[in-house]
Amino acid sequence: MLFDRRPKIRGEDFYDRKEELQLFFKGVEAGEGLIIVYGVRRVGKTSLVYVGLSELGIPFIPIDVRGFLVDLSFLSPQILLGVVGEVLKRYESYQGRVEEFLSNVLEYVESLDLGMLKLRIREKRGELPTKVLEHANRWAKKRKTRVVIVLDEAQELRAYPRWRDLLAWSIDTLENVTFVVTGSEVGVLSDFLKLSDPNSPLFGRARLEIKLSKFSREQSIDFLKKGFNEAGIAVKEEETEDTVDKLNGIVGWLSLYGYYRVTYGLTHVEALKRVEEDAAKLLASELEKIVKYSPKRYIAILRAISLGLKSWSEIKHFTEGVAGYIPDNRFNSLLQNLVKYSFIEKTENGEYKPIETLLPKAVEMLRKNTE
């Protein structure tokens, strides 16, 4: 179902992305040790990975890094990789398809608010992550397959440099293990991996990078039409076009709009209003984590860009009118943080614009909450 709210697993439920899928297939089949899938929020990165691995029929272990809460602060390779050993044991008796394997993997975690996940298994103290991975490698080699470990939203590991060492070691040492890392906060993911830093263990390591972009207007319209045809629902063309104009090629929001119309029978106006409200609340909560250290300045910058100001000087002039004088280097740092966390983008001609058309609503919501 194209309008399913969860990440896709089956190819028939996944729209287009043929070029990116073929590239992913080639990377896994060629034995790449590290595959990086990146793009802004809600463009289908997780679905691409799950569908790709399901189509290939390769065992994989999905780990949503955001959801592993250990003492609310401590995160270690031992704990995250503990699930790998447990899953491989479970896989010994596995005879079905990868979709079923994924459901078995998910038995090791429990759902929390905001889509977060929490481990239910205990850490095996003293067992090194390298030993776990060596076991996975032997297991896969014996069965003439690969084991793929998916680190979803891997930028959350940026405070844990040991992960870079572990990834580099795995690439160099393990022939039958592939790490797939995904990231929505593109600049932050880059900070974590440090692929361009000569002092990083990942510098110069072979890897495959796959970028997922937002849908074009034509793709967005086609996606909605196919989703409604699949559900047997007739939708006016002007409603489809209005939705695409408002949701700007973000497949997660397009899917949610279709889901509300198909599942709950909402009208166009009702469904679009609900998606916009949901999106604004989620974006505001995501922004809140970033702007809390300098809320007045950040919100002023975001308001300027939301109002259509594009150049560095225009945005700075507006921001200082609201928040007072800001040194250039500090202003640049604030602006760059918003780019790194994928809330705004810098175009080729040096102008700034929101990545999502719903950002202005989120900014106003955030501004009211902080007043």
Image: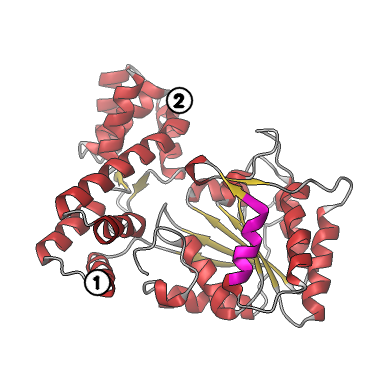
Amino acid, disc 2: Lys
The front one of 72 and 292 is 72
User: Residue 6: which quarter of the image?
Assistant: bottom left
In the figure, is residue 258 to the left or right of 72?
Answer: left
| Marks 2,1: beta carbons within 8 A | no
The front one of 103 and 227 is 103
Q: Main secondary structure of the magenta part?
A: helix
Residue 292 shows which numbered tag? 2
For image coordinates 69% across by 42% down, the residue present is: 160
Q: How crowded is mark 1: few (under 14 residues within 10 Å), some or many (20 or more)?
A: some
Amino acid, disc 1: Asp
In the figure, is residue 42 to the left or right of 34?
Answer: left
* Residue 141, above or below 7: below
The location of residue 25, given as percent across then percent down, is 55, 78
The location of residue 81, given as percent across then percent down, is 74, 54
For image coordinates 57% across by 47% down, the residue present is: 155
* SS for callout 2: loop
Q: Which of pointers 2 and 1 lies earlier in the amino acid sequence?
A: 1
* Residue 280, above or below 326: below
- Whether residue 242 is visible here, answered yes or no, is yes
For image coordinates 30% across by 21% down, the residue present is: 320
Foreground: disc 2 or disc 1: 1
The location of residue 95, given as percent across then percent down, is 69, 79
Membership of 108 in magenta stretch: yes
In the figure, is residue 295 to the left or right of 32?
Answer: left
Membership of 148 in magenta stretch: no
Q: Name the residue under label 1.
A: 222
Residue 100 shows which numbered tag? none
Q: From this viewpoint, which residue is outermost toward the right?
A: 126
